[in-house]
Image (tube, rainbow, N blue to C red):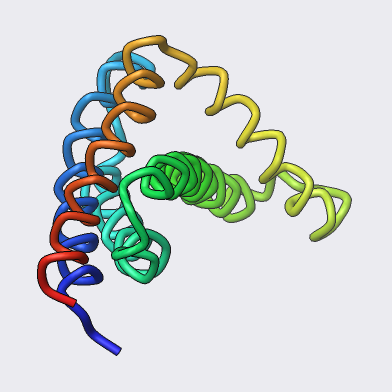
């Protein structure tokens, strides 16, 4: 059911995801992020803002802290999974997996570890955590005012 909290969560977290994606471009090798990086992270953040944060809006500002941190962790995990999955697909199309599909599935998680280490930057992590809480508080504001 669409509510103001869900709409606010989707818009706020979508914009936050766009900002995070722009901030993380410099962490890619030679500062060359894939062309899909900004739209994919923005879309993932929009969906998480709608489903995770927006659906829980209206419960108070203290629970919003945990909801914001949960949303931030979900954005980070799903974004790293998306880029690792794309890398696995390009490796698979290049015939780099000789032992079958299980090797490709396992390589997704190996790629996630590599990309996770690449994104282990204090500025990015602090922005993700603090921004997630601020975005959840803003979503909470709209969820309480317009139920």
Q: Nearer the viewer, residue 65 or 26?
A: 65
Position of residue 139 measured from the top left corner of the image (x, y, whole percent): 21, 56
Looking at this rendering, what residue extends furthest in the top direction?
122
> Residue 96's spot in the image, x, y percent?
70, 43
Residue found 76% across the figure and 47% down from its top:
97
Give the tally of numbered discs.
Answer: 0
Q: Quadrant of the N terminus?
A: bottom left
Q: Residue at the location (24% across, 56% down)?
A: 140
Quadrant of the image for the C terminus?
A: bottom left
Which residue ends up furthest to the bottom in the rendered image?
Answer: 1
Residue 92: percent from left, percent from top: 63, 53
Residue found 42% across the figure and 12% down from its top: 121
Instruction: Judge from the rendering whether residue 17 lies leftward or rightward of residue 99; answer left or right.
Output: left
Q: From the top left corner, tell me how far across and down residue 65 is, in percent.
A: 39, 40
Left/right of residue 21 with respect to residue 109 in the rendered view: left
**Residue 48, above or below 88:** below
Q: Nearer the viewer, residue 38 or 100?
A: 38
The residue at the point 11 percent across, 66 percent down is 145
Dividing the picture into quadrants, the one containing residue 114 is: top right
Q: Residue furthest right?
A: 99
């Amino acid at each position: 059911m669409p509510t103001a909290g869900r709409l606010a969560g989707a818009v706020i977290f979508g914009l936050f995801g766009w900002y995070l994606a722009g901030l993380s471009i410099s962490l890619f090798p030679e500062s060359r992020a894939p062309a899909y990086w900004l739209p994919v992270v923005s879309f993932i953040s929009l969906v998480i803002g709608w489903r995770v944060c927006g659906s829980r809006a209206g419960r108070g500002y203290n629970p919003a802290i945990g909801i914001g941190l949960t949303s931030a962790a979900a954005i980070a995990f799903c974004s790293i999974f998306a880029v690792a999955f794309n890398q696995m697909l390009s490796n698979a199309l290049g015939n780099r997996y000789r032992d079958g599909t299980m090797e490709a599935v396992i390589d997704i998680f190996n790629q996630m570890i590599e990309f996770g280490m690449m994104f282990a930057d204090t500025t990015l992590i602090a922005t993700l955590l603090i921004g997630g809480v601020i975005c959840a508080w803003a979503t909470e504001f709209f969820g309480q005012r317009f139920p």
